Image (cartoon, rainbow, N blue to C red):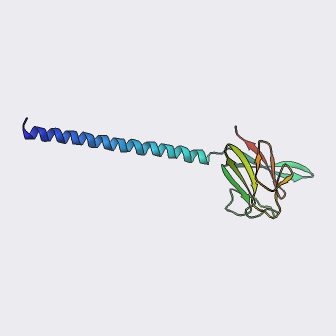
Amino acid sequence: MDIQTILLILRVTSAGLLLLLIAGLFFAIWRDFRTTVKQVTASKRSHGYLVAMREIDGTLALTGEIYPLMPLTTLGRAPTNTIRITDDYASADHAMVARRSGQWWLEDRKSRNGTTLNKTTIDRAVVITNGDVIGIGSTYFRVDLEN
């Protein structure tokens, strides 16, 4: 075999290996991209709803407002909250609903007027379930969780 043939074989082999390397990198990047898209989509997906209610003559009535429940949902007067409450008895950063270890938790964020769960004032993080009612001032939210 002459030197020209050997160089041609080496060039073709090098080009083939380079193409395999590029394909492998492309595959790895594509796999990471798909995984990231799935994670972002899952984090933005609603896991249920908080249905707003008002107390009228001692009875809770639906207001028609429904808010998606995210893995970390904050409630309060400040515009930075996930759910903004326009109630004089709500603090700027009043309460938080979070999903931890497969359970939903309600936590009062050291609000001035407190947070209630099923008309009982909470002083620490508590587990919430489907149908529970969260109270902040005169605003209430029924918890509707998806299975």
Q: Which of 47 and 9 is in front in this view?
A: 9
Can you give x and y, in whole percent of width and height, for residue 146 in the image? 70, 40
For residue 106, side relative to residue 101 (left or right): right
Quadrant housing residue 7: top left
Q: In which quarter of the image is the N terminus?
A: top left
User: Farthest right residue?
Assistant: 57
Please tell me whether residue 24 is drawn above or below residue 77 in the rendered image: above
Quadrant housing residue 96: bottom right
Please tell me whether residue 121 is drawn above or below residue 34 in the rendered image: below
Can you give x and y, in whole percent of width and height, for residue 85 in the image? 76, 59
Circle count: 0
Q: Nearer the viewer, residue 80 or 23?
A: 23
Q: Quadrant of the C terminus?
A: top right
Can you give x and y, in whole percent of width and height, for residue 3 in the image? 8, 40
Determine the residue positioned at 45% across, 42% down: 31
Determine the residue positioned at 70% across, 56% down: 74
For residue 42, side relative to residue 10 (left or right): right
User: Farthest left residue?
Assistant: 2
Can you give x and y, in whole percent of width and height, for residue 123 in the image? 81, 56
